[in-house]
Amino acid sequence: MKKILSICLVFILLFSSCAVSSNKNELPSEETPQSDNSSERIIAAWLYYNEIEDLVKSSETEKDFIANIENTVDKLKEFFVNTLILHARAFDDAFYKSEIFPVSKYCEDGNGNLKFDVLQCFIDVCHSKGITLWCWVNPYRINKVDDISVIKEGYFQYDALTSQNEQMLIRSPNGVYYNPADEQVKKHVIDGIREIIKNYDIDGIHFDDYFYPRTDKEIDSIYYDKYKADGGNLSLADFRRENVNSLIFSVCALVRKYNKVFSVSPISNIDQNINSYYADVKLWATSDSYVDYIIPQIYFGFQNSAQPFKETLEKWVELTGDGSKLIVGLAVYKSGTTDSYAKDGKDEWKSRDVISKEIDLICQNYEKIGFVYYSASYLYKDGDEGIEQEKKNIKNTVNSYFPSSVT
């Protein structure tokens, strides 16, 4: 009798296990995004629009361009990079074939056409070399300058710039941005993400730190007054945070529907994110419904007077709990330089070993936390003495933890 009961129990457990496994493979709905973090430590590099432009301009043919990408990726793999975060849309433009966005000036052929399908070429090379590729999108930023002459008719950005609604855009000294309070803007961003995911075999979507560029009341009074008239009771600050939260939640849900990952890279100061950019990083970091990975840009040395690296990292670790969704942005570009904003630590980067020490700290103390190099060209291009020495230190440090990372 005991033997029969044991056999029955085994079958029950097996059936239950299969049922659970099957549920895990179901696509989550856009309304209820689910987290699916990988257990592998992510070592990534940001490759931004000027770096893409250099690769495009130095290539006469698509064959040349692919060869340049292969060379770039091979050099990044020397620094144990397993994930490339590639600018796919920097200014409401496209480094790929799009029906929604105009061709980016950083990859056009001189006649307004796409010189190469940058995104597809990078996907092909990265995947052939075992590298994950995330599309880096700036959702709200339109242009560095408020100049309609550089905007093509027939696109959403042109309609926004010529709209009778002055508040559809937010203008700042750093450029022109869409207003996060506008529902048309939210739809535009989401449609753009959907277009990428449906047309390209990417592995993830990544947002940068551009949210609200200003804090004054005048930028969204029309939207906020309507919200209040309709019965809303949030404060202006909470209203703005909810506008950004709504987009982040919807994009995360969409991305996960297609079994991709979604990450956001805020600035390193938690309170400043929340109160100046209205980016509710506390909510994103502690909820399963907003991001798979949060990547604070901790671009500081250990001796920085305002935000020393170790203490700043510890704040983010505490915020994210076990660190499984935390990846750290590292400032390779500062190696060998003077950081005047660091005050007492302004000369620390001249030691040429800050990044390697930061990697050592992460790997020694945190099993799950990854890191991202900013930016890629400081690794794949020959640099000055400060960069070159730091690059040697990085290789030695990471190799001591992951001797079999490079294939």
Image (cartoon, helix red, strand yellow):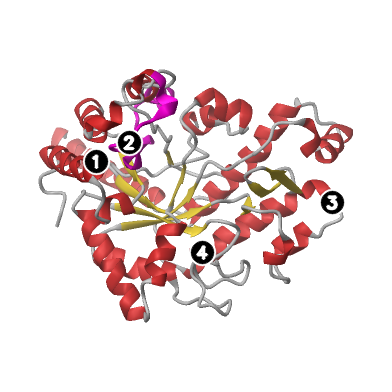
Comes first in the chain, label 3 or label 4: 3
Distance between mark 2 and mark 1 Cα atoms: 7 Å
Q: What residue does disc 1 label?
A: 386
Please report contact status of discs 2 and 3: CB closer than 8 Å, yes or no. no
Element type where label 2 sits in the image: loop
* Residue found 19% across the figure and 27% down from its top: 364
| Residue 140 as seen in the image, left or right of residue 160 | left
In this picture, residue 108 sits left or right of residue 141: left
Q: Name the residue under label 3.
A: 165
Q: Does the magenta stretch include residue 229?
A: no
When the figure is inspected, residue 331 is found, relative to residue 94, above or below; the finding is above
- Mark 3 and mark 1 lie on one chain; the one further toward the N terminus is 3
Which residue is more in the foreground, 156 or 151?
A: 151
Q: What stretch is highlighted in magenta?
A: 315-343
Image x and y of residue 219, in percent: 77, 38
State the CA–CA distance, disc 3 to disc 1: 50 Å
